[in-house]
Image (spheres, grey):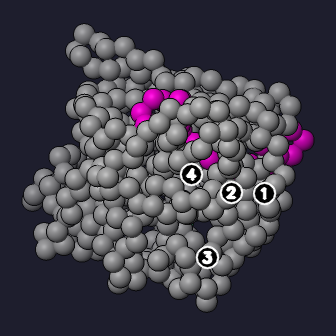
Amino acid sequence: LLLCGGGVAAVTWLVTGGLSVNTVGKVAFDRPLKVPPLAPSVVDADGRRVFDLTAQPGDSDLGHGAGTRTWGYNGAYLGPTLRAQRGERVAVNVHNRLNEPTTVHWHGMHLPAKVDGGPHHPIPPGGDYQAAWTVDQPAATLWYHPHPGERTERQVYRGLAGLFLIDETEDKTGLPHDYGVDDIPVVVQDKGFSGGQLSMDDRFLSDLGVLGDEILVNGTPGPYLDVRTGLVRLRLLNASTARVYDFTMSDGRPFAMIASDGGLLAAPYTTRRVRLSVGERAEIVVAMRPGERVELRSARTGLGVVHGGKDAFDVLQLRAAGELREGALPARLATLTKLDPQRAAQRRTFTFQGRGINGDQMDMRRVDAVVVKDTVEIWNVANGHDTPHSFHIHDVQFQVLTVDGNAPPPELSGWKDTLFLEPRRRYAVIAEFADYADPTTAYMFHCHVLRHEDEGMMGQFVVVEPGDTPRLSHN
Ligand code: C2O
Ligand code: CU
């Protein structure tokens, strides 16, 4: 298996300057886990579910006193959880109350390029913007975050990020589904502090950007969660700017992985580890016994020298009540229709190397790929050097066809929008670019290590009707 790392033992991970840290056993777990509130919404006269998000500065207690200056949506740090049903029309009114431009990108969402929230449409300080679309994709844990040109790392690091959950009209799975009770958002971020403030100084800088030495979950340092059910569903999001996590339970117990970025797996996959690079999500279900305590950890990866190689973190303590409401895991979760490689209308190759893709850096005037609407494409994505990357495509969910020519491991068997690119490995992914064509507006694909993205490791694709050609409107 990919996760076991045997095959990559020979690879040297050249990541300079990263802190080598180990917090396992040192975290107090003395604060109740904060759960981001569900965002209120109103259904307007047109039948659309309307949300409001205000990006704003504030002060937070992240474990270094109450005066840490942070940014958040509708609050001081992170943002509320948006939630909508498949088939619903939604509109989000975004207000920028920061002193610099920002955007909001709906990561993992299938939507028109015009409302994708990329760097072409900055919202100026004091400005407002509305994104509206129809939610039409399977139930999933998606997220939102800023995506302005060259400022994404610092804006996310200051605290701008939130979850966007999609539900099926009717949930027939029987999975834990009570938000904040047995269905828990777990937004994991690493931070460095200096003088009580979030720091991006040299001490925390590496080839990947900032690597902090403390972990926050939903903005809570040293968090614990009171569990009242025998099965607890954790929606893990790596909302860090650079760090990779290799999630495991402190006693090594197996758990069930039930979903990847874009939705449920076909069936629960029993494992002891789930690795997430920046931007990736996994949903897991952990079985608990009455009265016990167990911790979610990020273990030392089996990957070699990732950001110092000795990184291991305590993340979240689960504290089971003396009596637990019983639950059972379904044997089947979803029907996953495999995209057929025979249908591919186009094959492309993108090699990640240096700070470019195929040697090019982001240029908002250049279109790197013209995709015909409603066609299937295979993208061969290679990491050509020794730095790890995280590959993300906007608008679509893809399936992984191969990893170094082999069938993907079970954790990569479902819908994905972000993929860890291990050094010197090759991946083939397949996606259908359905529904939305717009010759005037580009979608992005890029490295989700946010410093790499800011430094230009990003390209653009435009989806057009057959026979049409792009003519970008923002140039
Ligand atoms: Cu999560 Cu282009 O980003
Ligand atoms: Cu990268």
Tell me the number on the disc at residue 250. 2
Q: Which residue is mark 4?
A: 238
Find residue 333 and report its horizontal and vertical position in percent: 30, 49
Work out whether residue 121 can be spotted: no
Asked whether disc 4 touches disc 3, contact meaning CB atoms under 8 Å apart, the reply is no
Tell which residue pokes out farthest to the bottom in this image: 10
Q: Residue at x 34, y 47 (%)?
A: 330
Tell which residue pokes out farthest to the top in this image: 45
Q: Earlier in the sequence, mark 1 or mark 3?
A: 1
Q: Which residue is mark 1?
A: 24
Cβ of disc 3 within 8 Å of ligand 2? no
Mark 1 or 3: in front is: 1
- Looking at the image, residue 142 lies above or below residue 47: below
Q: Quadrant of residue 167?
A: top left
Density class for disc 3 (Cα within 10 Å; few <14, some 14-19, many ≥20) is many
Estimate the spatial distance between the alpha carbons at disc 4 and disc 2, rounded to whole Å.
19 Å
Q: Earlier in the sequence, mark 2 or mark 3?
A: 2
